[in-house]
Image (cartoon, helix red, strand yellow):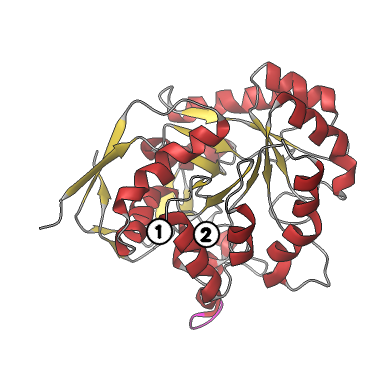
Amino acid sequence: MASQTLTIRRPDDWHVHLRDGDMLRAVARYTARQFARAIVMPNLVPPVTTPEAAAAYRDRIVAATGPAFTPLMTCYLTDETKPGEIARGFEERAWIAAKLYPAGATTNSSSGVTDIRNIYPVLARMEEIDMVLCVHGEVTDPAVDVFDREAVFIDRILSKVVEDFPQLRIVLEHITTDDAVQFVRGRDKVAATVTPQHLIINRNALFAGGLRPHAYCLPVAKREKHRVAVRKAATSGMPNVFLGTDSAPHARHAKESGCGCAGIFNAPFAIESYAAVFEAENALDRLEPFASENGPRFYGLPLNDGTITLERTEVDVPERIEAGGIELVPFHAGETLGWRLAD
């Protein structure tokens, strides 16, 4: 009989959106319940572009989660970001990474980088001080099909950055394509994060019986062959592929609107979702490296000391979650999962 529990080193989330204000107070506890640390995205309004803003945001997160959870802050890169400011924030430990959003690529990215050459001096400084670059890997060229934006970004931009800055550590976030898998395979300085949704849904989920706004995120889910490739990469033990939920909460009314927001709120049952995938792939023994070891090793951080335990039992995911007067729809809403995180 299969084991009824699975205990692993406490995991980290290497890509999460915790928002701010009421939304932060509503959602942060779901991440803190499962993860010891998380790389927090800086795309607030206004974005987190200074060490002072990062430190203040970190304090607000800790106030919402309690001190047992460690937010790892990031700097939002713009065309005007100065190398000295990046280095100052890194030296003061206000942030440990910087995030590249191509302008217009996703939620709150209008202040992002319009041309990668504009931040080459910043990238050179980051390479010098060994600071990680986190990348939203999509082009915004309207002539490029939305389902091809990641592959074109890798071909046009990322391959050139890797060539020009061979010692720069880069995380290609929330990969969705076989192109991304092949690009990161075997590289020491380039890694990838993988979300629960991109392991589970393909682009058909967007149109199952009608438009499904709660399956809409950026990058969008791709063809089945790409889902299979990403799933294989995550569960096969590649050392530079690790957990990053990209949990991105939006109030239900904002998702179910004439111009629904991009983002999937997967934090409430994230580790259970990953466990279901790894079990289906007969790879439960590889969940711990993916969730708890590969990420900190790439970032040069110590592994966590504590553990979490998952129980093999059914858990019903609610259709809606209400927190602080905000109604949210979680990933897997209305479904039953086969693992539950023990209290």
Q: Which mark is residue 308?
A: none
In screen coordinates, is 16 left or right of 30? Answer: right
Q: Is residue 91 visible?
A: yes
Indicate whether 223 appears above or below 27.
below
Q: Secondary structure at mark 1?
A: loop
72 over 152 or under it: above or below: above
Tell me residue 34's x, y (percent): 37, 39
- What residue is disc 1 on? 320
As drawn, 99 above or below 85? below
Q: Is residue 52 left or right of residue 294?
A: right
Mark 2 surroundings: few (<14), some (14-19) or many (≥20) residues within 10 A: many
Q: Which residues are magenta?
A: 208-212
**Identity of the residue drawn at 25% across and 59% down:** 338
Disc with the residue nearer the chain's start (1 vs 2): 2
Residue identified by numbered label 2: 252
Residue visible at 86% across and 39% down in the picture? 120
Q: Nearer the viewer, residue 31 or 257?
A: 31
Instruction: Say whether residue 317 is visible.
Output: no
